[in-house]
Image: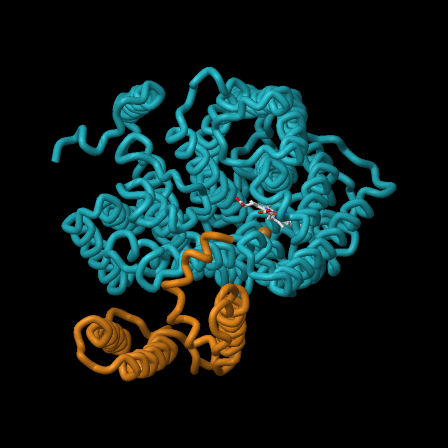
Chain colours: A cyan, B orange
Amino acid sequence: MHITDILVTGEPIIYGAMVSMALVGIALLFILTYFKKWKWLWSEWLTTVDHKKIGVMYILSALLMLFRGGVDAMMMRVQLAFPDLGFLNSQHYNEIFTTHGTIMIIFMAMPFLIGLMNIIVPLQIGARDFAFPYLNALSFWSFFFGMALFNISFVIGGSPDAGWTSYTPLSGAAMSPGPGQNFYLMGLQLSGIGTLATGINLMVTILKMRAPGMKLFHMPIFTWSTLVTCFIIVFAFPILTVALALLTIDRVFGAQFFTLTGEGLPMMWANLFWMWGHPEVYIVILPAFGIFSEVIATFAKKRLFGYNVMVWSMIVIALLSFLVWVHHFFTMGAGAFVNSVFSVSTMLIAVPTGVKIFNWLATLYKSKIEFTVPMLWSLAFIPSFILGGVTGVMLGMAAADYQFHNSYFLIAHFHYVLIAGTVFACFAGLVFWYPKMFGHKMNERLGKWAFWLFFFGFHVCFFPQYFLGLDGMPRRLFITNVAEWLPLNVISTVGAFGMGLGFIVFVYNVYYSFRYSERETTGDSWNGNGRTLEWATTTPVPYYNFATVPYVDEIDPYIRMKEEGKTTFEEDKVKPIHMPSYTGQPFIMMALLGLASFGLVFEWMYVAVFGLIGAVFMMIRRSFDYDDGYYVPVEEIKRTEKKARGL
Amino acid sequence: MADSKKRVPMNHVIGFILSLVMTLVAAWAAIQSDLPVTWVIIGIMILALLQAGVQLFMFMHVTEASSGNGHVPWNMMFHGFALAGILVAGSLFVMSFGHDHGDHGDMGENQQHEEQQSEDHSGH
Ligand code: HEM
Ligand SMILES: [Cu+2]
């Protein structure tokens, strides 16, 4: 086997990507070596079990994936605006929309939100880390290697090209030979382990490790949204795991679960995929709801209106999210009765969602709004998301969906909910909690530029797509030179580049703020408007989070703490704190599983077996590992706190 | 498991070996054995139940006082069963379309006709 056999050859764009990847890689190696940072990288980051550092790594990876997915998107938009240019051929276009969709949902939206949860949830409930810090590191590395595996596909072996939904029989061995589709299966499988483990981990953390006195209905709303999301993850992800495993067995070992021949039932893939897939869209929207609720309450300077109703509507949404999956394939033809049942359940979901919208509006009503950057993202979310929700209900009408299905109308719908919902929330949350993470705020002026560019870009890009859909333009099409569609496609592409510009300003702002922003002196960064416990910690947050954990018996406990002059450092109550030790095991174990997955992608069984044996060996080692962590002495805690609080 | 101080967790080792053996037996029954299909299915079902038992009693904390004497795990298991119910019943409800072309027999019979009818599926 020669290296050129597996490298993708013959595409100038891909050669360019290869060269730039090689250059960035060499530059990184050089920088790490020149500044002697290898040891730092290993002992501070690769071996960390600290939830805050793991969260930062999640968010960095997610931003990287937003860039990769965004470049994919730009390339598609160029092709659609200038169909005669011959910029992309059909194969390349198929690969790009497949990787774009998969990356944005699995490797951008979820890790971004999980990153924010990692950092913020323990701080909000007064915990010192996750329930299982080792497992948390394991989760991150499984996501990381899954992501790496999926991303190398376009230079080694070729990308998957059957859509992010990977429908059989198209994605089966007969119609998609070669490693491409295996990259999809193994990349998702590997990162799915991490997602499931995170779901369990956060669930236990929230149920078992809250501050003394904090009942479930005292928890901050973002923590609530995380808890509900964890339940969805724990119940939905196993379905994906099984579906991926069955398709892998089909493709690699010649079984016939989803094939056209034998006893296979190709539509069963769609059925299983959406049984996971619809809950999945709620996995990425509920935490977003949580973030908006926190931001809106903070900058409206009011307690969130209808806290209990907000919680219950999330629980109802979570339950209903398991009962609507068929709306993704009404056109399969299961019959009027089946379609009607799922049409009704789909429309029911809009009810609790609407309830939440009204609660946000009521929170804003007659409040003194402070227009900070996170608040701008949240305010923009409300009307934009309504457009997505209303069109969702339209799609939910089975009869009408026969017209809308697989057209640009659908594309516009899910971008309105995913971008105006999830992506806006990721930006809002990142800017909002940025001072907690890095000790300084992001620059407001640049932040507003990024916001307005992205906001207008988004609407200019996706609003016309509703009409393209109504004019009959199907999705996943690379030749679009139908005269009627061209103007709207061009407008849409202009909008896409506006969003790209917004993203660039955002990233530049990270650099600019690192250089020039004032360093935070208090932990309560937003003019003393903090309401929940994360703002009670000092900035930067000490690695043990809380010197003493306050007693909590209400919503928004930090408000009263401030009135009564209480802090998370009551000097006479400080006791030694038990912390977990750093370890390189999760990194190594998941690297080995990554190797095994790589072997399976190319169906090189020796590599796969070697990697698996290595991973199992690491697991056995872990079983006999009796490292119980260490205690932070009282002296050190007092020293750290006094320095941070300027006492 | 507060008493996990540097000793081999025998319970877990036995449980691990047991679950491996049961998995291998199930795989053998399906791939290598000459047993009739019904027996294979029944055998695998029984093994699955045993397997779940091993997981619950030797690894999880079903009987521990700190989990409310099993109240919490049972609660979760109930939700698991509810979801499994939705999964199976829902899939049958949704996926048994198109099978009433030729005969109006019961589900079990229809399954055997899938091969011939797959052309219909892609036609929809
Ligand atoms: C009011 C609530 C919502 C309703 C009633 C709704 C309804 C629907 C329906 C009926 C479809 C399928 C249309 C078709 O394929 O023809 C669909 C597709 C989709 N929806 Fe929603 N939706 C809602 C909210 C959301 C949210 C909150 C998200 C994610 C954040 C989301 C993400 C998606 C995605 C990704 C697809 C397309 C998947 C694909 O085919 O590739 N939806 N929605
Ligand atoms: Cu859906």
What residue occupies the far front of the structure in this picture? B102
Q: Quadrant of the N terminus of chain A?
A: top left
> Visible in this render: residue A517?
no
Residue at the spot 50% in from the left edge and 20% down from the top edge: A83
Q: Is residue A378 above or below residue A459?
A: below
What residue occupies the far top of the structure in this picture? A85
**Residue B73: where, in percent of width, then height?**
48, 75
Tell me the quarter of the picture where residue A554 sits: bottom right
In this orientation, which residue lies closer to the viewer: A218 or A59? A59
Residue at the spot 49% in from the left edge and 60% down from the top edge: A236
**Residue A85: where, in percent of width, then height?**
46, 15
Q: Is residue A345 above or below residue A503?
A: below
Tell me the quarter of the picture where residue B29 sits: bottom left
**Residue A82: where, in percent of width, then height?**
52, 18
Q: Quadrant of the C terminus of chain A?
A: top right
Left or right placement of residue A615 versus residue A219 in this view: left
> Visible in this render: residue A400?
yes
**Residue A545: where, in percent of width, then height?**
52, 49
In this orientation, which residue lies closer to the viewer: A394 or A525? A394
In this orientation, which residue lies closer to the viewer: A214 or B46? B46
What residue occupies the far right of the structure in this picture? A366
Q: How many numbered discs sit on the rendered protein? A: 0
Residue at the spot 50% in from the left edge and 45% down from the top edge: A110
